[in-house]
């Protein structure tokens, strides 16, 4: 398989919890092609008890912002926490490998436009368990 078609490395997560997303959903400048683009977080299985009460809830966003210099040096995965009803929950998963730049660009874009650096989130119940979808298309 050609290097540009390789899927992001799922890491140590099982296939059902490896996350989902594609760079094909983004333009060359890492801006989502449309408002419906999502990224499903990886590693949500251990956090099912935290996530189950949030299924279908409104007004959930990511909490936190840009990576620290230490995280950047170590190429650490981006852990995601949620902000709901004035409290921070998590971490509840990580951004799938290969899609970190897209999330960091979205946070940077929000910061530069003077908006809060929070990406809208949807918590969904699937056959494999409760999963977290970043509604990254809404950051356009």
Image (cartoon, grey):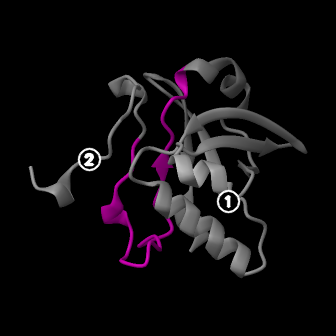
User: Residue 24 versus residue 7: which sits nearer the camera?
Assistant: 7
- Lower sequence index among marks 2 and 1: 2
Q: Is residue 23 magenta?
A: yes
Q: Is residue 28 visible?
A: yes
* Residue density around tag 2, few if under 14, some if 14–19, many if 20 or more, within 10 Å: some
Residue at 82% from the left image edge and 39% from the top image edge: 88
Residue 65 at what x, y percent from top left?
71, 57
Residue 39 at what x, y percent from top left?
47, 50
Tags 2 and 1 touching, CB below 8 Å: no
Residue at 34% from the left image edge and 55% from the top image edge: 22
Name, please, the residue furthest toward the left.
1
Which quarter shows the C terminus?
bottom right
Residue 55 at what x, y percent from top left?
66, 32
User: Residue 29 versus residue 55: which sits nearer the camera?
Assistant: 29
* Residue density around tag 1, few if under 14, some if 14–19, many if 20 or more, within 10 Å: some
Name, please, the residue furthest toward the right.
86
Residue at 48% from the left image edge and 35% from the top image edge: 42
Return the mark for residue 66. 1
Q: Is residue 120 visible?
A: no
**Which residue lies under the disc numbered 2?**
7
- Secondary structure under tag 1 reads loop
Most common secondary structure along the magenta stretch: loop
User: Residue 24 versus residue 75: which sits nearer the camera?
Assistant: 75
- Secondary structure under tag 2 reads loop
Q: Is residue 110 above or below residue 60?
A: below
Residue at 38% from the left image edge and 52% from the top image edge: 98
* Magenta stretch bounds: 20-45
């Amino acid at each position: 398989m050609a290097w540009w078609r390789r899927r992001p490395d799922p890491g140590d997560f099982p296939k059902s919890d490896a996350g989902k997303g594609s760079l094909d959903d983004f333009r060359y400048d890492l801006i989502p092609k449309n408002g419906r683009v999502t990224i499903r977080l990886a590693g949500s299985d251990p956090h099912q008890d935290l996530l189950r009460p949030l299924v279908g809830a409104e007004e959930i966003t990511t909490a936190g912002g840009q990576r620290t210099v230490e995280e950047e040096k170590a190429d650490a995965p981006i852990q995601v926490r949620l902000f709901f009803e004035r409290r921070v929950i998590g971490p509840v998963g990580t951004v799938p490998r290969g899609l970190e730049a897209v999330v960091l660009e979205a946070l940077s874009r929000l910061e530069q436009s003077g908006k809060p650096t929070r990406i809208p989130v949807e918590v969904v119940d699937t056959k494999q368990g409760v999963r977290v979808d970043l509604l990254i298309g809404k950051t356009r």
